[in-house]
Image: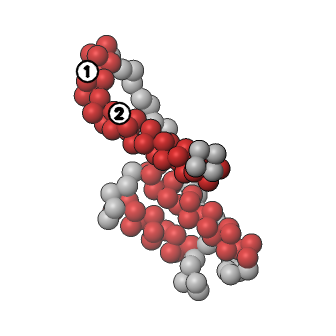
Amino acid sequence: MRKLDFGFISDYEFWLKSVRGCAQNTTMKYLGNFKKVIHICLKKGWIQRDPFLGFKMSKKEVVRGFLSMGNVNDSPAQYAPVAFLGILLSSKRRAATNNAFISQLNIFN
C-alpha cells in the first residue's frame, strides 16, 4: 500500500492505454472505479493519503452519427440470434426463480 501514489496512478493509466489498448473514456471509467475503491480505503483508514489528489480525469466527448435506414433495416436480421438467445436465457432464469419461490411457499406440495 505504500507504493500507492500519484506515480502509480499515472503508470496504471499508461498501462491501460498502451498494453490493454483502452481508449480515453474506457481508461477513465476504470480509473473512476479504482478511485471509488481508494476512497473506501481512505474512509476505513487503510491508507492515509489519496493517490488521486491532483490527478485530472477527463473524458472526451463522443459524437455519434445517426443510423441510416439501411442500418435500421439490416440490424434486426443481423442481431436476431443474439437477441433471441438473450430473451430465452432471461425467461429461463425468471422461470427458475419463480419455481424456487413457489416451492419455498409449499402451496402446491
Crowding at dot 1, Cα within 10 Å, few <14 / some 14-19 / many 20+, comes out as few
Q: Which residue is depicted at the point 59% across and 86% down?
A: 2
Left or right of 90, for residue 42: right
Q: Which residue is depicted at the point 39% across and 51% down?
A: 23
**Kind of element beneath mark 2:** helix
Observer-nearest of 66 and 91: 91
Name the image quarter holding residue 48: bottom right
Is residue 59 visible in the rendered image? The answer is no
Q: Give the amino acid at mark 1.
A: Asp
Q: Position of residue 25 (x, y in %)?
A: 47, 48
Observer-nearest of 76 and 57: 76
Left or right of 74, for residue 49: right
Mark 2 lies on residue: 83
Q: Give the amino acid at mark 2.
A: Ala
Q: Position of residue 13 (x, y in %)?
A: 45, 64
Number of numbered discs = 2
Quarter holding the N terminus is: bottom right
Tell me the number on the disc at residue 84. Answer: none
36 lies above or below 77: below
Mark 1 lies on residue: 74
Q: Position of residue 60 (x, y in %)?
A: 49, 43
Q: Position of residue 31 (x, y in %)?
A: 53, 60
